[in-house]
Amino acid sequence: MQLRDRRFLLLGGTGGIGQALMVALLEEGARVLVASRQSEGLQLPEGASGVQLDLAAADLEQQLQALTDVWPDIYGVIHCAGQNRFAGLAQTSVAAIDSQLAVNLRSPMVVARHFASRFSAAGEGALVFVGSTFGSIGFPGYTAYCATKFGLRGFTEALRRELADTPIKVLYAAPRATATSMNTDVVNRLNQALGNAVDSPERVARTIVHAMAHDQRRCFMGWPERLFVILNSVLPRLVDRAMFKQLPVIRRFLESGASS
């Protein structure tokens, strides 16, 4: 897809991967609307504008309608917003589960529902969803997060096939562990203990923009994570065994996080 001179709505663009995506898109000549619950006071570079949007709100559809009334020239939407919490299921509150479901899964569905018909009528448009390797591999301590990201992956797959006879492009991008403020100190130490590679937000953003520019449909990042995604789909018992070996280390950090 062409990026230059096109306007993209970026959800979750105020930090981490989203902020790096904003910079990468601007470097490609795109114009970016950065959505935030509090758009006032955002310090944004030239070519980017702030808009107010609460993805967890019950009236998200009405907010999207008001937004597109003001910005009818939006070509594409990049959903990069997300919430997670490293904790055992018993230590995860119902409120935390509801919050992750609302932001990570419900809001992408509502956003896609709002824009799909508009893009179809316009004869062009793009829907980009940033998922996670944990949308293909269930990982201890992230049961709620994995559930939402598994759901997001399934939703985008079904949506892509549903819109296959339209001009709308649908991309699902799945980063592996990324160095963002979303990770607590416990999570950072867990990644070190397990020897997990961690990408920079800038690297992830460049990969996503490259996938957009080359009209890719799926983009799974990192090695051996891409191999584990395939193994988990065809030989899940192998991944079960690998995770079982790691479980004592994971439990130690789960208990450390619960007590901190």
Image: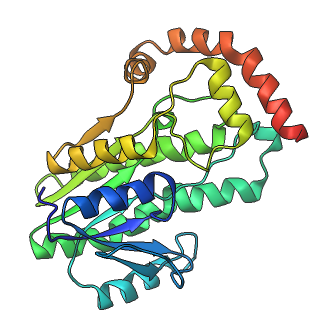
User: Is the residue 250 above or below the residue 71 in the image?
Assistant: above
| Frontmost residue, 233 versus 4 | 4
Point out the image quarter for the N terminus: bottom left
Q: Is residue 238 visible?
A: yes
Say left or right for 129 vs 163. right
User: Is the residue 75 above or below the residue 240 in the image?
Assistant: below
Query: For the point 52% across and 35% down, which residue is it?
Result: 177
| Rendered location of residue 163, percent (x, y) | 19, 56
User: Is the residue 132 above or below the residue 116 in the image?
Assistant: above
| Rendered location of residue 176, percent (x, y) | 46, 34
Tell how many labels.
Answer: 0
Point out the image quarter for the C terminus: top right
User: Is the residue 235 above or below the residue 188 in the image?
Assistant: above
Q: Is residue 154 visible?
A: no
Say left or right for 45 vs 176. left
Query: For the point 51% across and 59% down, which residue is it?
Result: 15
Say left or right for 55 vs 243. left
